[in-house]
Amino acid sequence: MKAAQQFASDNNAGICPQAWSILAEANQGHASAYGDDWWTKQAIDRIRGLFEADCEVFFVFNGTAGNALALASLCRPYDAVVCHRLAHIETDECSAPAFFSGGTKLLPGDGADGKLTPAIVEEIVGRRNDVHFPRVRVLSLTQATEAGTIYQPDELLELTARARHHGLFVHLDGARLANAVSTLGCSPRELTVDCGVDVLCFGGTKNGMAVGDAVIFFDRRLADGFARRCKQAGQLASKMRFLAAPWIAMLDDGSWLTHARHANDCAARLEARLQTLPGATILFPRQANTLFVGMADHHLQALKERGWRFYIFPEAGGARFMCSWDTDIAMVDRFADDIEAILTGQDGR
Amino acid sequence: MKAAQQFASDNNAGICPQAWSILAEANQGHASAYGDDWWTKQAIDRIRGLFEADCEVFFVFNGTAGNALALASLCRPYDAVVCHRLAHIETDECSAPAFFSGGTKLLPGDGADGKLTPAIVEEIVGRRNDVHFPRVRVLSLTQATEAGTIYQPDELLELTARARHHGLFVHLDGARLANAVSTLGCSPRELTVDCGVDVLCFGGTKNGMAVGDAVIFFDRRLADGFARRCKQAGQLASKMRFLAAPWIAMLDDGSWLTHARHANDCAARLEARLQTLPGATILFPRQANTLFVGMADHHLQALKERGWRFYIFPEAGGARFMCSWDTDIAMVDRFADDIEAILTGQDGR
Amino acid sequence: MKAAQQFASDNNAGICPQAWSILAEANQGHASAYGDDWWTKQAIDRIRGLFEADCEVFFVFNGTAGNALALASLCRPYDAVVCHRLAHIETDECSAPAFFSGGTKLLPGDGADGKLTPAIVEEIVGRRNDVHFPRVRVLSLTQATEAGTIYQPDELLELTARARHHGLFVHLDGARLANAVSTLGCSPRELTVDCGVDVLCFGGTKNGMAVGDAVIFFDRRLADGFARRCKQAGQLASKMRFLAAPWIAMLDDGSWLTHARHANDCAARLEARLQTLPGATILFPRQANTLFVGMADHHLQALKERGWRFYIFPEAGGARFMCSWDTDIAMVDRFADDIEAILTGQDGR
Amino acid sequence: MKAAQQFASDNNAGICPQAWSILAEANQGHASAYGDDWWTKQAIDRIRGLFEADCEVFFVFNGTAGNALALASLCRPYDAVVCHRLAHIETDECSAPAFFSGGTKLLPGDGADGKLTPAIVEEIVGRRNDVHFPRVRVLSLTQATEAGTIYQPDELLELTARARHHGLFVHLDGARLANAVSTLGCSPRELTVDCGVDVLCFGGTKNGMAVGDAVIFFDRRLADGFARRCKQAGQLASKMRFLAAPWIAMLDDGSWLTHARHANDCAARLEARLQTLPGATILFPRQANTLFVGMADHHLQALKERGWRFYIFPEAGGARFMCSWDTDIAMVDRFADDIEAILTGQDGR
């Protein structure tokens, strides 16, 4: 049953040892349900410590739910959210924001390298201001972006200043925030609350947990009613300790960051191999654990035929190769070898 | 951190050894996300085998989501659901059915022992038939009921025949279906598809899993679009193998049933001790793992002061004592001892 | 095509002369759409004058929309609304509040004469305070009530004080507010903003307009975004002048009140005839334009066979006879004659 | 109060004489509410006659509601609708489709002249077929289009054949269907049911009524539950006769078509004047009552300063001049004179 390693997504990896170990520990005896337990309280404290902020923290089952619940709490049904056209909320959550909020419209912009710019935000916000079109209420950013790039803190600050100017809330999809922190070498606080983020969805699943992301309100007033919102949406785990405990272990020993660093390093290793190859084009600057590569269709096909798994993103113009917390460096090398063989015509078949 | 055993809820128990063991096994290497993996396929097959039916099976994170998603797929926003006034969907899911469906109204009936009767269903269905009131579309039953009682197969058949007669779908909240199967000694199929159930929410969490229930459509046509519905609602797990694998282990070795039987037996043992005690009234026939007991407020208070945890249900008229897959028999006895001491005035304090 | 007069509902009556006349006037030439016209501005001013308050005013197509939009703006999907079990929002709006708000639950109470009391509100608010059940957020009252009774100002004040104490907003369904104002002889302001009402749905249709009710926010901050909410819900009329103009005419000449008084008087006249009849029981104190009468089924049947139209309300225990702005007094007398003949056995047939 | 004629929108015009006259007639005496009256039945019959089809017909308050209710009845929340990027449902209904359906996503395409093509539909439908993105379920077309152009019957047939091939329903926004019928000279049936339209929203307001559009289901099975859907959404008029009666008058004497023809003719007259002017560019083929004209900003500004009212559509690249059922030909000429004077520098001011 053990599947080979792949480069399709970091959510194909399993549970990391740190998470596994504390799950075993948390699984002793009984615990109060729905978050009224020691593990959950500790995990919340750890997250507050990590962000050096007295934030409100909620654990939900996955990133789609986290993002959509957060946006629903910031928006009314007649509001709109500015996001990138490659944003996960736009491309891969099956219209969850509109479902959770009861109608909210996404207004996608198209910035280079998967990133929005102040000018794009201005353009979208300025388009309409009449009752026949939704009111722009939220700026949603992703860090690291879906293109595998990263916003510098000053880029974030400029964007959130634009948002503030227009009375928008700022939501950050941080499914891979750890990867961005690793690359930038700054503190989680510097990248979030100090940059004007109101609500962060902090990914745990992709970083080595079994299930569960954290929704973090830096402006606590925005969290009013959020517990019931989670409950109503089927996002309040009864055995909450199993969502919460891994955060304790991974924040305490820093593995949340070392895992991200490892994934980033693997992607960098792959990039180093591919960037000099004829027939491979690095599509976006590789800044986290994701590498987008333009290659001829028959080359991609040949790569698939060798058993490698990865996604092709027509809207990005190529293939996405993603590394995870447990990617085997030897596997990266074999993958690069195969790509090289295909691109240089040494494909034995 | 290990909390003492309690009688508040079976969701205060942890992960059972069978689930734990297979989680370790499933956590080897990579697996495709979102259910496209060996474990999920096997788990679905096992569930089809258990119910001897070619059903559609979906794993979601919890029972609230399972129930609400199922009802939303059976209802339009202007439809209504008949349920018992003690039904979990009415009392403990924070209006999730109305949220997921976009407006569906619950029409609670008040039958004895937490059970609906054909007459009650008739009365509710017959109340209104005009455009100004929702159209009754679903009969929702719970087995075992929230009162800890059980519908006999012939009771179910009568109820679902009434539902059919009025064109209603039948939803079964089976958060504790295993407990009912154990008590009745019939097959899962006999209690569900043979009784006219269209959609079953089959509980895993309360029976020893970490997270996750199964939504099972016996009428496969009703499952059209359900995968996207789950995705949109944030209920499609990326690392699905961890929701699915425990079903394999627990169905293969029968622990899904032995756990339920153990919980039932513990509740029966407690019942046997309490039913002869002065000052304790068994409120509903004890048929599964839940015992409702009427006791004086100061007695309940004294019990809490001894450190026991349990819920008081004013709408049921007393306290609920619930046993779980791992309830320690010695703990049951000590609990009964304490109750006896309190009721017979031998409370040393 | 001219149908005979009836006692089924005041919405079976047509457009009153005052409304008709100003419609003709407003139908000269072109006017800007969506409320940006002279008529709408004037109508809003008139309503502000009537309530002696700097309120926000919106015209919507009907009372169901007005109530549901107002509640949706006061509630989040996980909130709840306390109302009477006979409230129109509970019995006759097809679950519109849950649809518009995306899940809000109604919590009906059962007070005498169609009226809630502070004790009932306390009981409902006090039932639950946990995350598994909706948070009570709004107290919704109806004036005149669906039972044809009226809250005295001090009754309203006591109720809204209870609401304030629990942090609830107060919504008033004023589909027949004019009838209550007529009965009580106080000013509209005294019955609304002075009584702590936050949002009023003020009925125009039943009082002689073709279509359209006014949603009035006395706390203007609560109206934030309401224009877009109306637009999104299909409740922003393009030719708004035709919804607005009748308010000008009817408020200017006082016909909004004289119409209500006429309807009340007709109901009083009918009551005077019936209250001494054997076999007729006045079910609720008649205080507005609605009379509920308990009569034997065969008597009601006989009345229908004579061609009279009215509704039977099993939940109220009898028939509802309703008078409107144009009810013919002679028709009231003939109706009373027929009832008397039936009840006293002088029914010639 | 009588506003000057304008070219902003056909919804700035009032009630036409035919509608007015029958409103007066319908306003005699009482009528049963909610559509259970003679006028409504007659109007439905007339519409069935007009379309030569045994369709289901519902009258709602406006086009936004009609479109959104129709789409909600064709879609589930996780479905998507293909439409043109200029479609009213995308640009001017404040995300109503997502609100009414609880999440449905619009997928706008960008065809020339405001029209979709089979190739565009294919491209959008073919983009995604996975659970992480909404399922395309409806093709929504507008006739006449928002660009003032018209689909030929064979264009419609090709589009709806593509829709059928992919299992999509076909919704037609016919706010200006009358204008298209007038231009094409074919029967309403030929342009709708014969072209594979499932649901039509047939505009009445813009064609001379006070309020109200008709939602027409040619496939009657799709109308299941639609009456309650309307009621729940606050779109069931109590005094329905006033929405219905104008349809009788305007279909009986053909004014629904002569009004449209007049508006078309006025737009054609304006076009004839402008098409030879320097500095004016006709942006889309003028085929109905709407003319889009590209002009320099300062020219448009000068035109506004002369008191003319019209909209500027940046997304279309110019100004929109729209004629209505009551546009005065002399006014068209004066408007053209003013434009000419401005463009040719003869602007005396």
Image (cartoon, coloured by chain):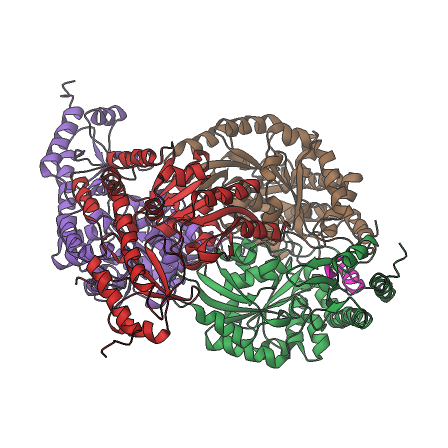
Chain colours: A red, B purple, C brown, D green
Is B179 situated left or right of D62 in this image? left
Is A91 situated left or right of D83 in this image? left
Query: Could you say where residue C119 lies in the image, as x and y percent from the top left?
Result: 47, 28
Is D134 situated left or right of C139 in this image? left
Q: Residue furthest top?
A: B349
Is B32 situated left or right of B134 in this image? left
Q: Is residue C16 visible?
A: yes
Observer-nearest of B82 and C138: C138
Query: Could you say where residue A59 lies in the image, as x and y percent from the top left?
Result: 33, 42
Observer-nearest of C173 and D107: D107
Q: Residue visible at 90% across and 57% down?
A: D348
**Quadrant location of residue B275?**
top left
Q: Residue furthest left?
A: B330
Numbered range of the magenta stretch:
D9-24
Observer-nearest of C331 and A126: A126
Total marks drawn? 0
Query: Could you say where residue B89 lies in the image, as x and y percent from the top left?
Result: 36, 47
Q: Residue visible at 11% across and 39% down?
A: B328
Q: Residue furthest bottom?
A: D154
Quadrant holding the C terminus of chain D: bottom right
Q: Residue visible at 31% across and 65% down?
A: A310
Q: Residue visible at 27% across and 26% down?
A: B297
Q: Is residue B287 visible?
A: no
